[in-house]
């Protein structure tokens, strides 16, 4: 059964005030997001495609690295575990992490992989195209053992854990299962941002946070109304044996589905410029909220507000505590 449940500003601000005392482990795929900004004034004479006159370029942390950045921006301590190549992009990514105050001690270098780079070409506030440079193969056994060791240590120290799966090979089926079991054994809340279509790979997660399209693929249910939405959510709960599922629905907000009920959270975004990285913001704020003592629903409301902040910015972005509190005041 669907319903909405209000949460007071006082309660949410109390949770936010506890963010700075929390430590979150983030494990997953590290990405360097590259943006090429320009204008389009003509079509190429060589093919029916726009010609982008480049004005500037920028690089940002993406994937699990952006989850870590969002957490740091909200005042949390972060242990980040992931894999990069041994290339120029890895050096730039690690430098960006360090300059953001994020420890790189658990970043593992692999000479057989290339660091994932997603390049987005933006013209007149619109994404024209994207190019990906990446390696998706499974981790070498030695690298996998190194990642496992760092992950176990980080989970042991954490108040909550985020598994950020972008399908680049770090969170294989075997690795995801092992890490979730480790979290359960240690009594840690573990939130999963999924990529694979078979959510049984995330069995026993505390919460899974698919978007509407991912939820449809995982459940086999086409979501077109309230009934199909709830059917998809309950199918995911069954497939993954998870405690909760949070389905992000764009301009329709979010729906938190448990074994007992469904709670709908309406969007608070006022202007949407770019949804890049919004899912990273959602799972970061959700995990941090629970770590700070919030219920899953209270944490989801905070995540909804944080996402509303970042989609109002261009490029991969994060929300600060002040921006989050301002959104809570208005919302």
Image: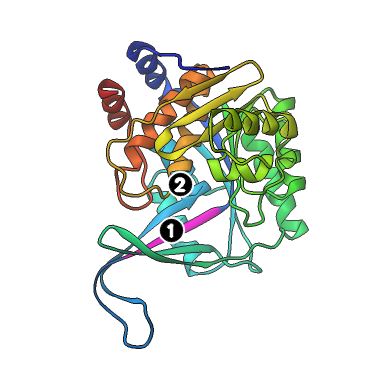
Measured from the top left, where is residue 76 in percent x and y? Answer: 44, 31
Residue 24 x/y as whole percent: 53, 32
Relative to residue 252, is residue 87 depicted above or below?
Answer: below
> Is 108 situated left or right of 317 in this image?
right
The answer to whether any part of residue 287 appears in the image is yes
Q: Secondary structure at mark 2?
A: helix
Is most of the magenta stretch helix, strand or loop?
strand
Query: Mark 2 = which residue?
Result: 66
Q: Quadrant of residue 156?
A: top right
> Which element carries disc 1, helix, strand or loop?
strand
Looking at marks 2 and 1 on the same chain, the residue that comes earlier in the sequence is marked by 1
The residues colored magenta run 30-36
107 in relation to 6, above or below: below
Asked if residue 50 lies left or right of residue 112, the reply is left
Residue at 57% across, 38% down? 223
Question: Residue 1: which numbered mark, if any?
Answer: none
Label 2 crowd bin: few (<14), some (14–19), many (20+), radius 10 Å? many
Q: Is residue 83 above or below residue 311?
A: below
Query: For the view shown, which residue lies furthest in the bottom direction?
Result: 46
Query: What residue does disc 1 label?
Result: 33
Is residue 211 visible in the rendered structure shown here?
A: no
* Closer-to-camera residue (97/180): 180
Q: Please tell me how crowded label 1 is: few (under 14), some (14-19), or many (20+) other residues with Cα within 10 Å.
A: many
**Which of the pair 147/70 is nearer the observer?**
70
Q: Residue at x 43, y 58 (%)?
A: 33
- Quick one: quadrant of the N terminus? top right
Residue 149 placed where, x, y %?
Answer: 70, 44
Going 41% across and 13% down the picture, which residue do you hit?
A: 6
Tell me how far mark 2 sits from mark 1, CA to CA: 9 Å
Q: Name the residue rendered at 58%, 32% in the picture.
A: 229
Determine contact: label 2, label 1, CB under 8 Å. Answer: yes
């Amino acid at each position: 059964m669907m319903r909405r449940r209000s949460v007071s500003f006082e309660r949410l601000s109390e949770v936010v005030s506890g963010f700075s005392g929390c430590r979150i482990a983030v494990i997953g795929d590290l990405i360097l997001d590259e943006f090429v900004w320009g204008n389009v004034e003509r079509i190429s004479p060589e093919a029916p495609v726009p010609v982008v006159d480049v004005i500037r370029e920028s690089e940002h942390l993406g994937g699990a690295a952006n989850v870590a950045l969002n957490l740091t921006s909200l005042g949390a301590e972060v242990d980040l575990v992931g894999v990069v190549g041994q290339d120029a992009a890895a050096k730039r990514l690690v430098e960006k992490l360090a300059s953001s105050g994020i420890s790189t001690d658990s970043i593992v270098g692999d000479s057989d992989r290339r660091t994932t780079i997603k390049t987005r070409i933006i013209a007149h506030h619109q994404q024209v195209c994207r190019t990906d440079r990446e390696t998706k193969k499974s981790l070498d056994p030695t690298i996998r053992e190194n990642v496992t060791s760092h992950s176990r240590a980080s989970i042991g120290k954490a108040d909550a854990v985020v598994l950020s799966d972008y399908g680049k090979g770090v969170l294989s089926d075997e690795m995801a299962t092992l890490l979730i079991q480790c979290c359960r054994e240690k009594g840690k809340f573990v939130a999963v941002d999924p990529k694979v279509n078979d959510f049984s790979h995330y069995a026993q997660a505390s919460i899974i946070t698919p978007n509407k399209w991912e939820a449809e693929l995982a459940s086999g249910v086409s979501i077109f109304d309230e009934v199909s939405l709830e059917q998809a959510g309950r199918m995911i709960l069954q497939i993954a044996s998870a405690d909760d599922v949070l389905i992000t629905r764009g301009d329709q907000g979010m729906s938190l589905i448990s074994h007992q009920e469904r709670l709908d959270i309406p969007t608070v975004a006022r202007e949407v410029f770019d949804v890049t990285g919004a899912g990273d913001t959602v799972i970061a704020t959700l995990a941090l909220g629970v770590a700070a003592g919030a219920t899953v629903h209270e944490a989801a409301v905070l995540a909804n507000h944080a996402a509303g902040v970042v989609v109002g910015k261009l490029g991969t972005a994060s929300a600060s505590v002040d921006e989050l509190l301002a959104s809570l005041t208005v919302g």
